[in-house]
Each structure stands twice: as structure tokens, then as C-alpha cells.
Amino acid sequence: MPRDRKTGHDEKPSGVLFGVMPVLEALRSGSGRLEKVLIAEGKPHQRIREIKALAREQGVPCRSVPRSVIEREAGREANHQGVLAYAASAGYADADALIAELAEKSDPLCIVLDGIEDPHNLGAIIRSAECAGVDAVFVPERRAAGLTDTVAKASAGAVGLVNVARVTNVNRLIEDLKEAGFWIAGAAGESSVIHSDHDWKGKWAIVLGSEGSGIHKLTREKCDVLVKIPLYGRIESLNVSVAAGVLLFEAMRQRSAAGQRPEEDT
């Protein structure tokens, strides 16, 4: 999928916490809303070590940076104590618990995003996922958009209604999904399989690649099938969020026809 525009996946989340105890309490709460933690370089004390341990347990990226970086983000007058964290606009679901829950369902449908950097695209995908009744959306921790304010706005509030889980490794996630009974379909324009000809009934995870290079090579190889959306104009590919909507609603059309999903409430 081509990149529509580079808005930057380093966009800051909705809130900034600074100081040892505020960040430590946010981690202790297990809210799942911290995007990443920054700690000033230097010899850590016990509470800093606890912050690092909790961040590691919860899959929150934690980086050591020069103190000047934290001063710039928190402000020179702030009592940041060498610790700063970014908070997301909505909490993340626990990936392992979510997969275990999906394994018990007969026909779950989920999305795996392989490095979507544009927050507007991520928000639009989450919105389509909610409208299609998708069970989960999985996003990578690094080199991808997180649940920022921009994403929340673009999703029209859907970030609070969809299970969004963050994972450290997309390929490992795919293996976990396969163990849970899922088939994996990747969106790729060079495929010979048209999306509407594919049978979407059962347990499926749809992998969507980045706006620039599409699905990574190793991830592509782990897919059970690659599908394409036929195009009839001169532009080579759809915006990734539009492609997500097309694939999801074709899957839901087939499932509704087979009685796997209830008809739309009117």
C-alpha cells in the first residue's frame, strides 16, 4: 500500500506523565495506557529498577535517554526526576489473554497491522473494524502508530469499543494465532486470489502492511493465503484504511450469508 503522507509515527500520545511516582503508579495500575517510558541515563535506584521491570512485564517500551531529552519534553522547571512516560488515548488489551479468548470462539475475525505509521489510517482502520464487528486489532509496539489523540479522533471514538492489543513481534503473533486455530490472510496486490473469491468463513486474521512497502517479506511468508482487491483505474493501490474496509465487509457479507454473524440491527 502506498504511503498517503508521512505524518510521523513518533507523534506524541494524549498525555505526558513525569516524575518517579506518577509513572510508577501508572505502571502499577496495569491500565495498559502507557505507550513508552523514558529514563534519564545514569545509575538507577530501586524505584527506577521497578519502573523498568514493570514496563518489561507489560510490554511497554522503556528507553534510556540523555537528561536533556526529558527536560525538553517535561520542561526545565518540572520536577521530572529523570523519568517521563507517554500515555495513550485508550488502554491496550493484553495480547495473550485476548488470543486465549479468541481461541474459544468458532468464527472470530481480527486484524494484524504490520507497521501502519499514519495515525489517520490507524484510526480509520479501527473505525471500520468496529463497524464490521471485528474481534481484535493487533498493532506492533515499534515503528507504528499508537493510540494517540489523532487516532482516537480519526476512529470517531471506536478506540474505546474495539480490543486493540500491542505486540512486540508480528511474526510471533501470527504463530500464536495459528496455534489458536486461526488462518492468516495477507493483503497483497500481486496475489492471484481475488478477495471476494476467497472463503472468509471460520477463524481468520487479516494482515495489512505499511503504507509504503506493504507486508514485510517474512510476515508475507507466514500467511496461509494472499488476497488482492481488483482495481480498475490508473492508481496502483488503495489507501490501506479503505482496503481494510473492503476486506472486512466482504468477510462479514460471507459470514452473514452463512449464518455466522447476526444481520444488521435496524
Image (cartoon, rainbow, N blue to C red):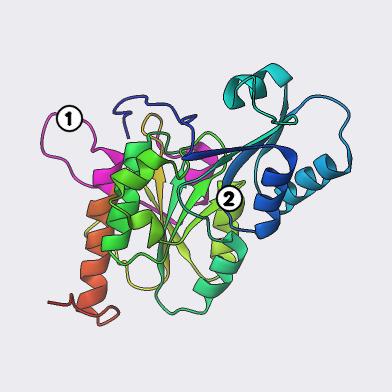
> Does any portion of residue 206 appear in the rendered image?
yes
Residue at image point 60% right, 68% down: 97
In the image: residue 209, left or right of residue 258: right
Work out whether 87 lies above or below 259. above
Residue at image point 40% right, 41% down: 149
Task: Select label 1 or label 2 by which is in front.
Answer: 2
Q: CA distance from mark 1 to mark 2?
A: 32 Å
Amino acid bearing label 2 = Val
Work out whether 135 lies above or below 218. below
Residue 141 coordinates in the image, percent (x, y): 57, 42
Amino acid bearing label 1 = Ile
Q: Nearer the viewer, residue 46 or 226?
A: 46
Label 2: few (<14), some or many (≥20) within 10 Å?
some
The residue labelled by disc 2 is 167
Asked if marks 1 and 2 touch (Cβ < 8 Å), the reply is no
For the N terminus, give its image quadrant. Answer: top left
Q: Quadrant of residue 85?
A: top right
Q: Nearer the viewer, residue 185 or 102?
A: 102
Q: Secondary structure at mark 1?
A: loop
Residue 22 coordinates in the image, percent (x, y): 67, 45
Residue at image point 70% right, 30% down: 79
In the image: residue 166, left or right of residue 189: right
Work out whether 111 lies above or below 22. below
Q: Secondary structure at mark 2?
A: strand
Range shown magenta: 214-243
The residue labelled by disc 1 is 235
Tell me the number on the disc at residue 50.
Answer: none
Residue at image point 68% right, 44% down: 23
Is 104 magenta? The answer is: no
In the image: residue 114, left or right of residue 45: left
Q: Nearer the viewer, residue 231 or 15?
A: 15
